[in-house]
């Protein structure tokens, strides 16, 4: 009986993290957003952008959050962390205030769900590299793409 419960739980976890990874949020929207809210970041030679949905593959989201904290991305002047798809802001605030995420200057909390409204439909966090106002790389942070952490470290 325990094996059946374990197999069922693992199956649910695995399949809940299997979703469409196609983000339809356009490069134009992202660049316009940066120029509106974080202009200095848009004009840097190299900037790193993390779009993290508040719901989706919870293991993937927890992993990137931990990675960002461990590597002190909140201190990076060339990085921006965006939290979007927030359905319950009170629960979101309770979860992230303990890490201090909400007080970091390079963290944007998308309270209006602009990214969701403009097509960010992925259950996975997304990592982007922006060079001189052009998006040069987009990677989803998903179970099948663990090498993305090396790409992030190489571009820190």
Image (cartoon, rainbow, N blue to C red):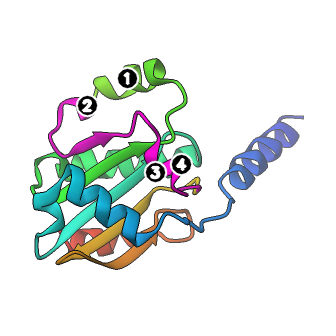
Q: Quadrant of residue 35?
A: bottom left
CB contact under 8 Å: marks 1 and 2: yes
CB contact under 8 Å: marks 2 and 4: no
Quadrant location of the N terminus in the rendered image: top right
- In the drawing, what numbered circle is on residue 68? none
Name the secondary structure under disc 2.
Answer: helix
According to the image, label 3 marks what residue? 115
CB contact under 8 Å: marks 3 and 1: no
For image coordinates 70% across by 54% down, the residue present is 14
Asked if the magenta segment contains residue 108, the reply would be: yes
Give the distance between the C-alpha atoms of the residues marked 1 and 2, in whole angstroms: 8 Å
Compared with residue 87, is residue 137 higher up or lower down, i.e. above or below?
A: below
For image coordinates 44% across by 46% down, the residue present is 114
Q: Could you classify mark 2 by the number of other residues whose Cα lies within 10 Å: few (under 14), some (14-19), or many (20 or more)?
A: some
**Residue 22 image point, x, y percent:** 59, 68
Relative to 154, 83 lies left or right: right
According to the image, label 4 marks what residue? 117
According to the image, label 1 marks what residue? 93
Q: Quadrant of residue 90?
A: top left
Query: Can the viewer see residue 78 in this picture?
Result: no
Give the distance between the C-alpha atoms of the residues marked 2 and 3, in whole angstroms: 18 Å
Name the secondary structure under disc 4.
Answer: helix
Q: Which residues are magenta?
A: 101-121
For image coordinates 47% across by 63% down, the residue present is 141
Of tags 3 and 1, the one toward the viewer is: 3
Observer-nearest residue: 128 or 118? 118
Query: Can the viewer see residue 123 in this picture?
Result: yes
Compared with residue 29, is residue 147 higher up or lower down, i.e. above or below?
A: below
For image coordinates 46% across by 51% down, the residue present is 115
Of tags 2 and 3, the one toward the viewer is: 3
């Amino acid at each position: 009986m325990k094996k059946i419960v374990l197999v069922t739980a693992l199956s649910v976890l695995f399949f809940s993290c299997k979703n469409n990874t196609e983000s339809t949020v356009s490069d134009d929207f992202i660049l316009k957003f940066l120029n509106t809210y974080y202009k200095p970041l848009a004009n840097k030679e190299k900037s790193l952008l993390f779009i993290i949905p508040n719901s989706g593959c919870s293991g993937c989201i927890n992993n990137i959050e931990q990675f960002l904290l461990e590597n002190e991305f909140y201190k990076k002047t060339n990085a921006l962390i965006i939290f979007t798809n927030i359905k319950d802001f009170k629960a979101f605030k309770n979860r992230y205030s303990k890490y201090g995420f909400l007080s970091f200057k390079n963290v944007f909390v998308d309270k209006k769900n602009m990214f969701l409204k403009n097509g960010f439909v992925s259950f996975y966090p997304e990592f982007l590299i922006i060079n001189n106002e052009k998006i040069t790389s987009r990677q989803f942070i998903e179970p099948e793409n663990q090498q993305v952490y090396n790409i992030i470290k190489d571009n820190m």
